[in-house]
Image: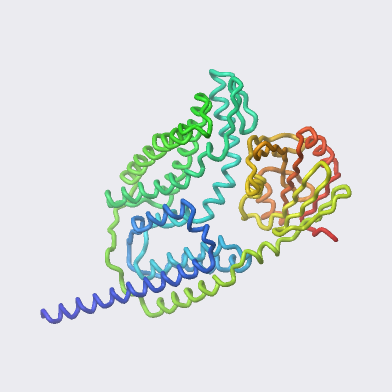
Amino acid sequence: MTLAVLGTMMQNAGAVSRQQVLLILLTALGLCAGCIGLPFTYVTVSNFVVGLVLLPFVIIRQGPARINVCYLLGVLFFGWLAHLYLLKIFFFLMVAFFLLLVWEAVGGKLNTIILFQIALMSPVFLQVTAILGFPIRLWLSQCAGMLLQVGWDVQVEGNLMILDGFQFAVDEACMGLSMLSLSMLMGVFAIVHHYRKAKRTLSLGWLVVFFAAVFGLNVLSNLFRIVMLVLFRILPEDPLHEIIGVLCLLLYVMVPLYFLAKTLVRKFGKPFEQIATPTYTPIRSRLLLAALGIFVLSMSFTIRPEGAELSIPHAFVEFKDAKGIELNGGITKLTTDDLLIYVKTIPEFFTGEHTPLLCWRGSGYQFKSIRKEHMGQHEIYKGVLSRDQEKLYTAWWYTNGNRVTIDQWEWRSRMVTEKERFALVNVTAKDEMLLDRNLKQLFKGELIVRPEQRVRQ
C-alpha cells in the first residue's frame, strides 16, 4: 500500500514537472517572438515596466487547465490584423493572447483581472490616453476656469488661463495622464490584494465599473491640481509643481481607489478557491500550442513598419503654385513664402493620434497655447509653437475633401461607417495675423485636399 502511494506521488511529481517544462518552453517561444517583432520602446515605457513587476502578483489560478477559445480566437484575429496592416500594435496583442492561451492551457484557468492588466500594459492604452488626453485637457481648463471665476478674475483661452496677469498653460504634465497608467495599475494591485485577503472575486461588469471610477478620480485629481497651481502661481520649473501632483494623486486617487476596491470586493465579490496545482495538458492541446507558437514566431519576421509607412497613399493636394513634396507615411509637404502646409493621410480609423501636438515635438517645439476657434462655418484648432526664442503659429483640422472637423469620434466613425478617407491638414506661419488671413483664403477653396487620390506628378 505504501509503495503504491509513493509510486502515485512520483508519477504526479513527474507530470507536474513536465507541465512546468512545457509552460517554460511555450512562454519562451512567445517572448522570443515578441523580442524579434516588437520595438524596444514597447517594453521600456512605465506602464509596461510597472505592469511586468505586478504580473506575478496578479496571476490567480481559479480552475483546471483548458484551451480558452476566446484567447485562441484572439491570437488568430490579431495575427490576421497584424499581417493585413503590418502594425506592431496588433502583433503585441497577438503575442499577449498567445501567452494567455498558454498559461490557461498549461497552468490553469486565470482570473479575469489579468485581461485588465494586459490591456494597461499594452501600447493600446497609451494610444487611447493620447487620443483622450487633448480634449480632456481643454475641458479641464474650462472647468478649472469656471471654478476659479467664482472668486477671482480669471480668463480662459483654450488651455491657457490668465489670473491677475499671470499666465498658466495646462500642458500634458498638468493634465497628468502620464500618471493615469500608474493609478490604473495600482487599481489592479488593490483589487487583487482584496481578492487574496477576502477570498472573493468580482465579475467583469464590476471590474469595468471600478476602473471607470479610477479614471474619473484621476480626472478630478487633475482638476484640483490645476486649480491649486493657478491659485498659488506655481510654474512647471518650481519643485512644488511635481510635489502637488504627487500629493493630489495620493489623496484623490490612490486612497479612494483602495477603499473602493475593498468595498466592492466585500459587497459584490463571489467566493473562490485558488487552484495551486496545475492539471495535466492533453497531447492534442500541446500540439496545438506548439503549432500556434511556431505561427507567432514566423509572424515576428514579417511585421515591418517600413512597409506599412510606404503603403499609405498620399492625398491629392493643390494650393496656388506650390509644388507638393511626398514624404514617407502618406505626408505631403507644401511650402510658400508665407506658409508651411502638411497634409497627412490617415491610413485607418484605429491608428493613433494624428495631430501636430506629437509631430512638432520631434522637432524640439513645445505648444504654449492651444484653443478651438471658428473660421467661418468651420471649427479648427489653433496653437502657438515655441522653441528657444522662436515662435510659430499653427492651425489644424481633419478633412475628407468636403467636410472639415476636429471631432475625433466623427472622423473615426465616418471612416468606419461611410468608408471615407480622412487627412490631417496642418498650416503654420510665423505671424498670427498672416496665418488668419491665409486661413480665410484656404477655406474659400484655394486649398484643395482629396484624401482618396494621390498627388499627380
Colouring chosen for the image of the structure: rainbow
Observer able to see residue 70: no
Which residue does the image show at 54% across and 54% down from the upper left? 124
Q: Nearer the viewer, residue 169 or 57?
A: 169
Q: Position of residue 226 (x, y in %)?
A: 52, 31
Q: Is residue 298 left or right of residue 329?
A: left
**Image height of 409 relative to 298, above or below:** above
Query: What is the quadrant of the N terminus in the image?
Result: bottom left
Q: Position of residue 393 (x, y in %)?
A: 72, 38
Looking at the rendering, which quadrant does residue 85 occupy? bottom right
Q: Is residue 427 left or right of residue 188?
A: right
Looking at the rendering, which quadrant does residue 254 occupy? top left
Query: What is the quadrant of the C terminus in the image?
Result: bottom right
Which residue does the image show at 86% across and 44% down from the upper left? 446
Q: Is residue 333 left or right of residue 304?
A: right
Q: Is residue 168 left or right of residue 442?
A: left
Which residue does the image show at 37% across and 61% down from the upper left? 110
Which residue does the image show at 30% across and 69% down from the upper left? 278
Looking at the rendering, which quadrant does residue 261 occupy? top left
Observer able to see residue 133: yes
Number of numbered callouts drawn? 0
Q: Nearer the viewer, residue 246 or 348?
A: 246
Q: Position of residue 334 (x, y in %)?
A: 80, 50
